[in-house]
Image (tube, helix red, strand yellow):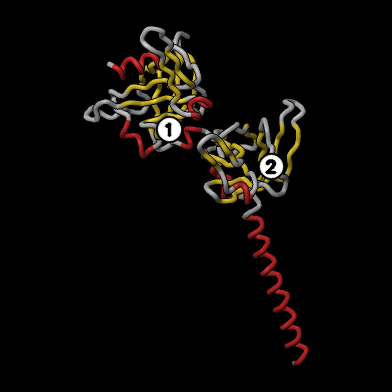
């Protein structure tokens, strides 16, 4: 009888150990996920087995290896994505490296000073794929996904670049996201994104003006005028928006506006 009880105890211990082992193995398998490969032009700040793949502050993967792609000469990272996040990663998903940024009048991504650089993702669900090409910076359409997108048509884009601010009463309400040429190649088409809280500012009668750099109007008879809006617009460029009448209808996504030059804007303000 005593041996039987001892045998039962041993079997119970074994059964409990097996149950715990199976449970742990299942949890490990459930989170195992798959490897993906992301090509970047620069991965400064990323550390193998330490840097993470993050989505809205949630850790969904770990960078396991950084290597040089001999075909392109650019770095490629191998990362393990947790299984729950795999359905989110379709072929159009976007990845970019997040690092602390210090610029004139602004400091961004301070949290990375303590957590280290990481790779952020804007997931677009679809058929799971293993190969991706990372972006040089955060996509503007993701940053302003809830806002307004309008297009400015200009004769030139002097001083303007991707990331240049859209200013309303010297308050930054958006930025330049894309730049290109019109179909006939005669105009510059500048896509700008307006942040959601300021969408109501943009009306059908709004006008935009290039206020990049400084402006000098030299006249020995009537006097000279030199204008510098801010150090920010001198360095990165800027576009000012003016809305004369808020009774006009709100602008719609994709609306096209003509962008004035500094000279045209000054003449309009003085009239």
Left of 94 or right of it: where is 242? Answer: left
Label 1 CA crowd tier, 10 Å (few <14, some 14–19, many 20+): many
Left of 101 or right of it: where is 245? Answer: left
**Residue 11 locus on image (x, y percent):** 73, 78
**What is the spatial separation of the Cα atoms under label 2 and label 1, in whole angstroms?**
29 Å
Q: Is residue 186 above or below residue 200?
A: above
Left of 105 or right of it: where is 257? Answer: left
Of residues 194 and 168, the one drawn nearer to the viewer in this rendering: 168
Image mark for residue 46: 2
Q: Is residue 220 above or below residue 105?
A: above
Which badge, 2 or 1, comes first in the chain's sequence?
A: 2
Q: Is residue 185 above or below residue 242?
A: above
Looking at the rendered image, the disc whose residue lies closer to the viewer, 2 or 1, is 1
Of residues 95 and 228, the one drawn nearer to the viewer in this rendering: 228
Quadrant for the C terminus, please. Answer: top left
Quadrant for the N terminus, please. Answer: bottom right
Q: Is residue 79 above or below residue 23?
A: above
Of residues 254 and 189, the one drawn nearer to the viewer in this rendering: 189
Image mark for residue 174: 1
The structure residue drawn at horizontal position 57% and vertical position 33%, both measured from the top left corner, is 137
**Residue 191 locus on image (x, y percent):** 44, 24
Left of 193 or right of it: where is 234? Answer: right
Instruction: State whether residue 154 appears in this view.
Output: yes
Q: Secondary structure at mark 1?
A: strand
Q: Based on the displayed image, in which of its 4 quarters is residue 132 positioned?
A: top right
Instruction: State whether residue 182 appears in this view.
Output: no
**Residue 194 locus on image (x, y percent):** 40, 32
Q: Secondary structure at mark 2?
A: loop
The structure residue drawn at horizontal position 35% and vertical position 23%, both measured from the top left corner, is 255
């Amino acid at each position: 009888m005593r041996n039987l009880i001892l045998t039962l105890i041993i079997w119970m211990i074994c059964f409990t150990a097996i149950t715990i082992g199976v449970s742990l193995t299942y949890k490990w398998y459930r989170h195992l996920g798959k490897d993906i490969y992301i090509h970047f032009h620069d991965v400064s700040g990323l550390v193998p087995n330490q840097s993470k793949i993050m989505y809205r502050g949630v850790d969904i993967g770990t960078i396991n290896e950084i290597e040089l792609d001999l075909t392109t000469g650019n770095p490629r990272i191998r990362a393990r994505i947790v299984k729950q996040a795999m359905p989110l990663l379709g072929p159009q998903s976007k990845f970019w490296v997040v690092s602390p940024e210090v610029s004139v009048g602004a400091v961004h991504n301070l949290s990375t000073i303590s957590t280290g650089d990481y790779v952020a993702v804007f997931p677009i669900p679809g058929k799971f794929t293993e190969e991706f090409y990372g972006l040089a910076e955060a996509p503007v359409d993701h940053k302003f996904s809830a806002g307004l997108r309008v297009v400015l048509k200009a004769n030139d884009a002097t001083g303007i670049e991707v990331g240049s601010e859209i200013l309303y009463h010297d308050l930054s309400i958006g930025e330049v996201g894309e730049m290109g040429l019109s179909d006939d190649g005669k105009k510059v088409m500048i896509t700008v994104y307006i942040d959601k809280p300021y969408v109501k500012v943009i009306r059908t009668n709004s006008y935009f003006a290039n206020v990049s750099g400084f402006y000098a109007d030299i006249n020995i008879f009537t006097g000279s005028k030199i204008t510098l809006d801010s150090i920010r617009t001198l360095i990165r460029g800027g576009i000012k928006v003016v809305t004369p009448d808020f009774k006009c209808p709100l602008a719609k996504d994709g609306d096209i506006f003509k962008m004035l030059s500094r000279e045209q804007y000054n003449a309009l303000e003085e009239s």
